[in-house]
Image (tube, rainbow, N blue to C red):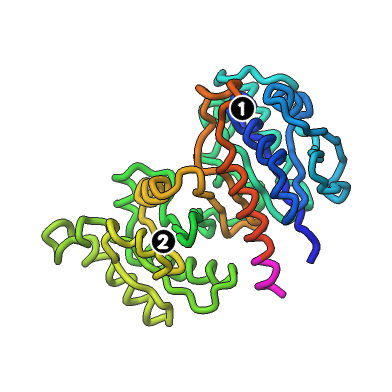
Amino acid sequence: MDRPTLALTLGDPAGIGPEIMAKALAEGSAYEKMKPVAVGTRGVLEQVIEGIGLELQVRTIEAPADARGERGTVDLIEAGTLQEARFGEIDAEHGRAALDAIEKACSLDVDGLVTGPINKEAARAAGMKFPGHTEMLADLLGADPDGVFTMFVVGKLRIFFLTRHLSLRDAIDALTVEKVHDGIVRVDGLLRELGVDDPHVALAALNPHAGEGGMMGDEEIRVLRPAVVKAREDGIHVSGPVPADAVFHQGHEGRFDGVIALYHDQGHIASKTLDFFGTVSATLGLPLIRTSVDHGTAFDLAGTWKADARGQVNALRVGAELVATARLSRA
């Protein structure tokens, strides 16, 4: 099967996004499974290549079909006008450069996306009207934002997030039997799309010890258990609510094909503690597979050339693997 073509946005130029992308492409393993096409400006990319001292050539192309996917060469589609980054600065010009790359990447005929980290303050100053990167991608790609799920991949553990960028209070208030049930059904379907024939899904509990029969919160009794029962009646293999201090370890051991986290930090803490640089964020439910590193712009490191690119290498690998798996499941 032909190697898929993936568009790689460089992220906020003032952060470590361009650096870790250049380092990951110089590492070279991505070329075995994909044809990477960087999206951004040649000036910024060459600035970081020179700063790091990498032996990489940049080749500007007009369309993804022109990509050769050759080690040692970065195929680049120009997006934006900023040609030199001012590392560590949060401003609208850098935010606009990041948004230009995202918008361009979403317009290309590619098999998937690997996005660099953006700074929301800079992006908002540049005109971004969405609460996050994921919501922006859903809008640009014409996807229903309610059908989009974030999945973290680290080893055998797959974590799906029922809610994303909400405060803890708002995330708890958002829990209803219908929302949780629909989330379980959606995760079951997404796992099947990823080639899992009979998924076993686990739902994390909200309260300590899954509420201890109502002694430490009643959300398990009022919301989570009824949603699980309803999903089982639909024929879905789902366990839970499982105490959150155990379920992620069990998922990592392979007991479950996917674990549903109820709020942002519940899943983030588990995955990042397990392997900070090995955790890859994937967005499912878009017309394209999208992966990214699960860390931010690290302005304090930008321009020092000390950023660790292991997460970016993993994001490229997982992106190519998910695209290949999706292809096979549709065949």
Amino acid marked by disc 1: Gly
The reply to whether callout 2 and callout 1 are in contact (CB within 8 Å) is no
Q: Specify start and end residues of the magenta stretch as a single range.
A: 325-331
Q: Residue at x 33, y 46 (%)?
A: 170
Amino acid marked by disc 2: His
Q: In x, y percent, where is residue 92?
A: 60, 22
User: In the displayed structure, does residue 304 sit left or right of residue 56?
Assistant: left
Q: Which of 106 and 59 is in front in this view?
A: 59
- Reading the image, the residue beneath label 1 is 95
Q: Which residue is drawn at 55% across and 35% down?
A: 308
**Vertical order, 132 against 331 (above or below):** above
Q: Nearer the viewer, residue 133 or 257?
A: 257
Q: Nearer the viewer, residue 285 or 316?
A: 316
Element class at badge 1: helix
Q: In x, y percent, where is residue 302?
A: 57, 24
Element class at badge 2: helix
- Reading the image, the residue beneath label 2 is 252
Q: Which residue is drawn at 81% across and 48% down?
A: 69
Q: Which of 149 and 311 is in front in this view?
A: 311
Residue 138 in sight from this viewpoint: no
**Vertical order, 324 against 269 (above or below):** below
Q: In which quarter of the image is the C terminus?
A: bottom right
- For mark 2, does the 10 Å Cα neighbourhood hold few (<14), some (14 to 19), or many (20 or more) residues? many
Q: In x, y percent, where is residue 242?
A: 29, 65
User: In the displayed structure, does residue 47 sit left or right of residue 11?
Assistant: right
Q: Residue at x 29, y 45 (%)?
A: 169
